[in-house]
Image (cartoon, rainbow, N blue to C red):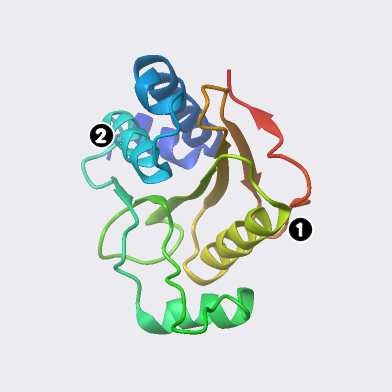
Amino acid sequence: MTSAISEAVDDDNAVRQALRAALRTVWSERPDLIGHGVCERTVVGALAMALASVVAGWDQGWRVDVEYNRWHPDGLDEVRQKFLPDFQTSERERLVLPDLIVHHPGHAGPEHNLLVLEAKKGDISPRARELDYLKLTGFLSVFQYRQAVFLEFDGRGGNPRLQWFAGDGPAPDPTQPAQELVE
């Protein structure tokens, strides 16, 4: 890795700027997705493609994945038990997969797990926001992601909002929308 690439990846603000740039790209170039209530997964997939083009310039080893399920079962159980004890349905335990990650596949630790993102579309209830906040807290703790972010958008063309998480800080108030408006 060149030093400029290392500096970009080591600078948390650069990672945040890359995500903001990818969001702006999707929101400006894909109004068919943003303004017509298209499924959250489809929007996150478009975001992953836009973010991957930025990440590719940092280092060939970084990769953006959507709903990546490489998790070790023990780690998933730990996230579920410690952070989401009531995250079950009557039939089965619900999957705990991040909507989007930036990582070095096959490696663990903060030097390989750069960003984890959870997303929600539409009118988001405080309970839905709280569950995603708990998942993000679990991913930060168990899988040692350097950064975590919650993305919310209305599905009607409004600007996206981001809520960033610090590894050691308290979770944000789930009764309030994400704090950062991306314009």
Secondary element at image label 2: loop
Residue at 27% x, 29% y is 53
In the picture, the quarter occupied by the N terminus is: top left
Residue under circle 1?
170
Dot 2 or dot 1: first in sequence order is 2
Front-lying residue, 4 or 135: 135
Circle 2 crowding by C-alpha within 10 Å: few under 14, some 14–19, many from 20: few
Mark 2 residue type:
Ala
Q: CA distance from mark 2 to mark 1?
A: 32 Å
Image depth: mark 2 or mark 1 in front: 1
The one of 61 and 77 positioned closer to us in this rendering: 77
At 56% from the left and 64% from the top, the residue drawn is 135
Give above or below for 173 relative to 36. below
Question: Hey, which quadrant is residue 36 in on the image?
Answer: top left
96 relative position to 106: left or right: right
The type of residue carrying mark 1 is: Pro
Provide residue 182's location: percent of width, then percent of height.
59, 24
Give me the residue at 43% from left, 43% from top.
Answer: 40
Percent coordinates x, y for residue 64 in the rendering: 31, 45
Looking at the rendered image, the quarter that the C terminus falls into is top right
Give the mark count: 2
Numbered tag placed on residue 142 in the rendering:
none
Disc 1 secondary structure class = loop
Is 148 on the left-hand or right-hand side of 167?
left
- Callouts 2 and 1 close, C-beta under 8 Å: no
Location of residue 156 in the rendering, given as x and y in whole percent from the top left corner:
52, 26
How many residues crowd around disc 1 within 10 Å: few (fewer than 14), some, or many (20 or more)? few
Q: Position of residue 54 (x, y in %)?
A: 32, 29
Which numbered marker is on residue 56?
A: 2
- Residue 158 vs 176, above or below: the answer is above
38 displayed left or right of 69? right
